[in-house]
Image: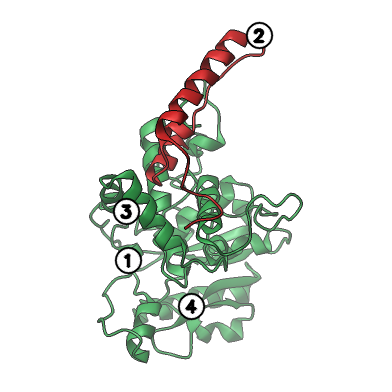
């Protein structure tokens, strides 16, 4: 799915998948921080939005 | 090809007369010389309608799910690509093998009636191609499963299946997005691609559901693209590359670019795989079975 979205021109940073167990609170926090940082780097999404220009 | 027509009629007549099958799925001549329309023959007296020529491009297997809730035996004409579709339908438990009498056709490649129509009606000045686009990189012109066979054995064509995908992959992300959104702005959401597809054999299709409505139904480029993303993910690993979706598309969206990309991904993740080649258990699509060593990356 990630490779497919990339093929369509979507930045890979926007779609991330991780396996986190219910007991891994710290891992969840770390990954979320990481995702937010990555998405901030690529900026607001302009693709695949309803109000497509 | 007229030999083949004669042979096809002979086989169909025998099957219907002996009562082996209740119906024969084949093609008959349409209004124009370049049209061989899908047809169903139920009576031995009608077999003279059957034809088998270079315009029999439609996949008859895609219609089999319509007969899944009945019990009569069906004879079906199948080219290489159609036969792979039939294997997939049997694997998906849509149709038991015993209900089918498969008349295989060693297929030299078909002509695209749409191209001939455009040329004949003056819509296009281009000369129609000798072979339909979908037949150009066909790897399995000979049926993989059959009870009886018509025509001479054919050689597989050059393997250029991924040439177009590689071309798209070499573009930048923004170029790719612009390219696809432009193509999908043409889509009229007629769902012909879904209806022509053998892999699309669910009883209830998610695109027909309204509660919840998974994908917006308006024909704007983004919803069109989302529709096609979902559709191609659903057939990932089960697509037999018959190219029917692309051929059936009335506005000419290159849908095989989506399907082939996913086939390429499946090849890379699960090892080389082509759907619908054999009925063995280990020939099931990678996404329809579980193995301990399956990769995690696909999601």
Tell me which numbered mark, 3 or 1, is placed earlier along the sequence: 1
Q: Which residue is mark 2?
A: A23
Label 2 Cα crowd, 10 Å radius (few <14 / some 14-19 / many 20+): few
The residues bearing labels 3 and 2 have C-alpha atoms spaced at a distance of 50 Å
Q: Of residues B16 and B280, which is closer to you in this image?
A: B280
Tell me which numbered mark, 4 or 3, is placed earlier along the sequence: 4
| Mark 3 in CB contact with mark 2 (< 8 angstroms) | no
Q: Which chain is green?
A: B
Q: Secondary structure at mark 1?
A: helix
Q: Which residue is mark 1?
A: B133
Q: Which residue is mark 3?
A: B139
Residue most extreme to the right: B211
Q: Secondary structure at mark 2?
A: loop
Say whether residue B243 is visible. Answer: no
| Mark 4 in CB contact with mark 3 (< 8 angstroms) | no
Q: Which chain is red?
A: A
Residue in the image at 47% along x and 50% along y: B239
Say if labels 3 and 2 share a chain.
no
């Amino acid at each position: 799915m990630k490779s497919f979205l990339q093929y369509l021109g979507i930045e890979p940073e926007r779609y991330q998948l991780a396996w986190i167990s219910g007991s891994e609170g710290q891992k969840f926090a770390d990954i979320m921080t990481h995702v937010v940082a990555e998405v901030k780097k690529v900026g607001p999404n302009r693709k695949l939005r309803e109000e497509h220009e | 090809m007229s030999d083949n027509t004669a042979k096809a009629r002979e086989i169909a007549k025998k099957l219907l007369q002996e009562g082996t099958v209740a119906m024969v799925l084949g093609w008959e001549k349409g209004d124009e010389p370049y049209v061989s329309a899908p047809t169903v023959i139920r009576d031995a007296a009608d077999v003279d309608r059957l034809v088998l020529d270079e315009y029999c491009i439609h996949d008859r297997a895609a219609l089999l799910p319509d007969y899944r809730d009945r019990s009569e035996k069906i004879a079906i004409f199948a080219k290489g690509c159609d036969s792979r579709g039939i294997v997939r339908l049997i694997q998906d438990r849509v149709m038991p093998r015993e209900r089918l009498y498969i008349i295989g056709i060693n297929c030299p490649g078909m002509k695209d009636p749409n191209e001939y129509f455009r040329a004949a009606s003056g819509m296009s000045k281009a000369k129609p191609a000798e072979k339909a686009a979908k037949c150009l990189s066909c790897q399995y012109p000979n049926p993989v499963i059959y009870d009886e066979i018509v025509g001479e054995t054919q050689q597989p064509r050059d393997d250029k299946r991924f040439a177009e995908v590689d071309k798209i992959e070499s573009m930048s992300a923004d170029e790719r997005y612009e390219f696809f959104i432009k193509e999908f702005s043409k889509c009229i959401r007629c769902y012909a691609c879904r209806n022509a597809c053998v892999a699309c054999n669910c009883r209830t299709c998610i695109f027909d559901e309204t509660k919840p409505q998974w994908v917006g139904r308006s024909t704007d480029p983004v919803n069109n693209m989302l529709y096609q993303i979902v559709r191609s993910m659903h057939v990932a690993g089960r697509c037999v590359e018959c190219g029917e979706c692309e051929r059936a598309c009335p506005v000419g969206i290159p849908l095989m670019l989506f399907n082939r990309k996913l086939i390429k991904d499946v090849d890379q993740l699960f090892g080389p795989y082509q759907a619908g080649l054999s009925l063995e258990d280990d020939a099931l699509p990678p996404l329809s079975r579980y193995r301990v060593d399956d990769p995690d990356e696909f999601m």
